[in-house]
Image (cartoon, rainbow, N blue to C red):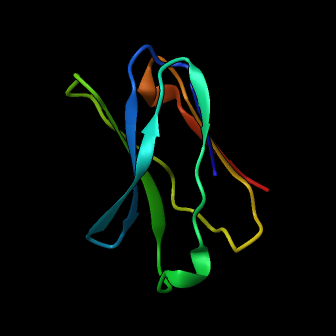
């Protein structure tokens, strides 16, 4: 998974599955970060990404993900987090 962070703050990235939240890592401000997620280890159901900017009360959730092992997920975080987008290939 790649996170392209156009924001000026570092963003802590979590994987949401139902009501459970797993920390993936931190996407550094104004850079691209890469994280390894093994989807086969997760149970079936809706998956989302959640971003919590360090030092801000604003957060962002992705749309539900439909990804399989081998897919590349790219989450682009904009400075205005409401304009962020996700792509699965």
Q: Residue at x 53, y 32 (%)?
A: 84
Q: Residue at x 49, y 81 (%)?
A: 42
On screen, residue 8 above or below 69: above
On screen, residue 48 above or below 78: below
Residue at the extreme bottom of the image, as rendered: 43
The C terminus - image quarter: bottom right
Q: Quarter-wise, where is residue 37 in the image?
A: bottom right
Give the image location of residue 69, x and y in percent.
71, 74
Give the image location of residue 70, x and y in percent.
77, 69
Residue at the extreme top of the image, as rendered: 8
Give the image location of residue 43, x and y in percent.
47, 86
On screen, residue 20 above or below 43: above
Q: How many marks?
A: 0
Q: Quarter-wise, where is residue 32 in the image?
A: top right
Give the image location of residue 78, x and y in percent.
53, 23
In this picture, residue 88 sits left or right of residue 19: right
In this picture, residue 73 sits left or right of residue 61: right
Q: Residue at x 66, y 68 (%)?
A: 67
Q: Residue at x 48, y 67 (%)?
A: 47
In this picture, residue 66 sits left or right of residue 63: right
């Amino acid at each position: 998974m790649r996170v392209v962070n156009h924001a000026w703050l570092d963003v802590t990235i979590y994987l949401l599955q139902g009501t459970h939240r797993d920390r993936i890592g931190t996407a550094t401000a104004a850079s691209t970060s890469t994280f390894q997620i093994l989807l086969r280890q997760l149970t079936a159901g809706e998956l989302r990404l959640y971003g919590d900017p360090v030092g801000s009360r604003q957060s962002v959730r992705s749309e539900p993900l439909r990804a399989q092992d081998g897919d590349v997920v790219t989450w682009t975080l904009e400075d205005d987090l409401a304009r962020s987008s996700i792509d699965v290939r």
